[in-house]
Image: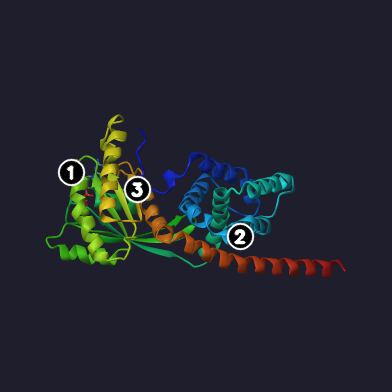
Amino acid sequence: MAPKRITQFSSLPYEIYQHILSFGVSDSELLLKKNFSSGSSEIQSCVRYVANFQSLNRKIASMPEMERYFDRFWWNVWEIWFGINPSLEKEFSLLREEMILKRELKRKVLMAAFIKFHIWRRIKNLNGIDETKVVMIGKGGVGKSAMTVKYIQDFFIEQYDPTIEGVYRKQLLVDGFPTLFEVLDSAEHEYSSARDHHMRYGECFVLVCDLADINSVEEAEPLVEQLVRVKDFEENSFPVVFALNKVDLLNETDRPITIEKFTNQIATLIKQTQLTNTFIIETSAKTGENITRVYEECARLKRYGSVDNLTLLKEVIQHDSAFIETCKKQRKLMKQSKNCSVM
Ligand SMILES: Nc1nc2c(ncn2[C@@H]2O[C@H](COP(=O)(O)OP(=O)(O)O)[C@@H](O)[C@H]2O)c(=O)[nH]1
Ligand SMILES: [Mg+2]
């Protein structure tokens, strides 16, 4: 059985997932022509982003003005920003009519998010480097130092030195955004006040558990409780990535069963502590499996996770309206100057 993941992503109905993918793939040529770098990982990140919008569907279904907005607006965005490939024109207008006729709101929302993703990302990109402070937490021996060093230096530490502590920096492109990670690898401390200090400093947390130790999640519990206490957020929306480490120690048959067991335990812990911005993933500092992904997910949770979808959507609408106006003006100017040069 496949391991359960507690992400909004996993509850996205498969046919919608597929629809977005096929949309992304069949139009990748079109995107490329417009100087978009395209590739499967990019499409994956689009899908992930779109998935974040799924809860929106229910909220906006009761808002007629939003519905009307989707009937027209995003198609205009599409036409202006991407242009319509003449060979696709007929297909495109059919698709549009069908969607509006059938009032397929969900599809429209997903599609809107897909288009929005490209536009929004470009704009955000101009804002320079995103800095993310990550703190590694977990009981001694679970692999915090090994994971950090694997990520920063691509090297696996065999020996165990529980006293090692340090801050490391590394830059990475996450979904096209330059992101600077500052990773604090914390050691065991006699006093929990030192941990308080680390927790206050961090923006994102990687809580490491050891898949080879059945008590690992239980032992992580007080750490999560301390984190919730120290951060003292109204809503526990600070990003927490749960890393189920040492997956290399499991054999093929045990692997899915053990991962699922740990995932369920963590799900309970998340529920208990009311964390709202989490991701769970199996890792190995030894083989490097999913190590980079852990930090990427930190950046993603920080960027998208804590924003209320509806607020974000409204922001986007405002922003895009202005953007479309500028595009129209530019087009007009270009047309005028073309006409002038012909004369
Ligand atoms: N097989 C295996 N061993 C690991 C992995 N990660 C860490 N270790 C080992 O576990 C021990 C403790 O790791 P360390 O990173 O120092 O733990 P920390 O106390 O959480 O910082 C070391 O001997 C590491 O070599 C892993 O993914 N797989
Ligand atoms: Mg350590």
Report if the CB atoms under discs 3 and 2 are less than 8 Å apart: no
Direction from residue 314 to residue 250 in the image, left or right: left
- Pair 2/1: label in front: 2
For disc 1, the marked residue is 215
Quadrant in which the N terminus is drawn = top left
Distance from Cα at disc 2 to Cα at disc 1? 52 Å
* Nearer-the-camera pick, 264 or 329: 264
Does the beta carbon of the residue at mark 2 sit less than 8 Å from ligand 1?
Answer: no
- Residue 121, compared with residue 154, is above or below; it is below
Q: Secondary structure at mark 3?
A: helix
For disc 2, the marked residue is 69
Q: Residues within 10 Å of mark 2 (few under 14, many from 20)?
A: few
Residue 288 in percent (x, y) is at 34, 44
Residue 330 in percent (x, y) is at 70, 68
- Pair 3/2: label in front: 2
**Of the residues under marks 3 and 2, which one precedes in the sequence?**
2
Residue 157 shows up from this direction: no
For disc 3, the marked residue is 291
**Of the residues under marks 2 and 1, which one precedes in the sequence?**
2
- Type of amino acid at the residue the image marks with label 1: Asn
Q: Secondary structure at mark 1?
A: loop
